[in-house]
Amino acid sequence: MKYVVCVPDGCADLPVPELDGRTPLEVAHMPMLDTLAARAVVGRAAVIPEGMPPGSDVGNMSIMGFDPVQFHTGRAPIEVAAMGRTLRPDQTAFRCNLVVVHDGVMVDYAGANPSSEEGAAVVAALQDEVAPRYEGVEFLAGVGFRNAMIAPKEWIDADCTPPHDLSGDPIVLPTGPAAGRLIEVMEASREVMEHFDMEADQTWLWGQGFQPQVPSFRETHGVEAGLVTAVDLVRGIGVLSGMKICDIPSATGWYDTDYEGKRDIALAELEAGLDLFVIHVEATDEAGHAGDVAAKVEALEHWDRRILADLVPALDAMGPWRLLMLPDHATPLTTRTHTPDPVPYLLVDSAVDGPGGTFTEVGVADRAPVPGHALMGRLLAG
């Protein structure tokens, strides 16, 4: 038996006025997904436990079958794990976005989408010019605007607002005992970034946490698993749980990511012996944050045409398979930020038909939500 988990990040939504009160999942032309849903089990999943922040770190941990209430310590330490670093007990980690802030307004939480090379150059300058001012501070380059900072453990004591929660709004600076140092670092980054020919003009620190203790995926679920993603926090969950991380250079974490490349690496790894593979695509989430209706619909259609349409026949050729598809949270176009609402899920078995349904928000609105971290067990149990 082969298993595939498909994660269209943030694809769940609310009714959109530009779509006549429908959602992107209702509007997008996805014939293969419709065919799968017609013979699947569909329902709602509470991927974000009550009271926890509705982020991709929490949601993807749920999807991987690990209860965030038990294992989540913060977003940034997961991303640092993806960068190959293990935090000491005296350290904490922060996500370090490159952002655009004009006149006290968060113009772009993604820093106008700089390349990873541009981001790495800024991080190197921050390490040279800002880090020496503070004992125990280190900047780490990630992917594009997504970078990290390691700091002394006492720096964790601050309330920090995710920059994507501030899109188009006045910034909300950190508060709490450690806030002064964080604000100093962000202000210092403006001086450094003045010397770069890019729209991003400062860093934004958030998502702090200590080293998490995530158990082995193999020991927890009994299968060998791998994943492909361009997002460090998803990669980090894989690193922490011992999954095989499959990187492809054309995975960007943006609208232009390589859908076919992610499909093909999944099929190749399953053919080579892995039991389970996770395909994660960020594009729907980025479109939600940007409020870009057309881009979100198009990203869903890319999933259908460029991944699922050829993935399913190839899985059929391998033998029996099961597929789980769901987002890690909702990112509504009207709010442009994550919400903790339950999301649709689809679970299909190649040999056993389910009752069928539609993979849309309205199609599962009457279903009682199941805990997100329980779905991995349902996928593997059948």
Image (cartoon, rainbow, N blue to C red):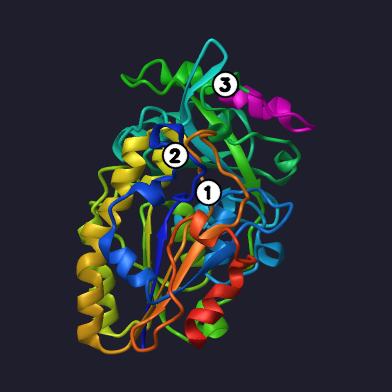
Query: SS for tag 3?
Result: loop
Query: Who's the residue at 28% across and 71% down the image?
Result: 266
Q: Are marks 1 and 3 in contact (CB under 8 Å)?
A: no
Within 10 angstroms of label 3, few (less than 14), some, or many (20 or more) residues? some
Residue at label 2?
A: 288
Q: Are marks 1 and 2 in contact (CB under 8 Å)?
A: yes
- Which quarter of the picture shows residue 324? bottom left
Q: Earlier in the sequence, mark 1 or mark 2?
A: 2
Horizontally, residue 293 falls left or right of residue 298, namely right
Residue at label 3?
A: 169
Q: Earlier in the sequence, mark 2 or mark 3?
A: 3
Q: CA distance from mark 1 to mark 2?
A: 9 Å
Relative image position of residue 294 (x, y in whole percent): 32, 37
Query: SS for tag 2?
Result: helix
Indicate the amino acid at tag 3: Asp
- Which quarter of the picture shows residue 216? bottom right
Query: Who's the residue at 25% across and 43% down the image?
Result: 256
Query: Who's the residue at 52% across and 71% down the image?
Result: 241
Image mark for residue 330:
1
Query: Which residues are drawn in magenta?
Result: 172-187
Relative image position of residue 224 (x, y in whole percent): 42, 82
Relative image position of residue 96 (x, y in whole percent): 52, 37
- Which quarter of the picture shows residue 212? bottom right
Query: Who's the residue at 74% across and 52% down the image?
Result: 51
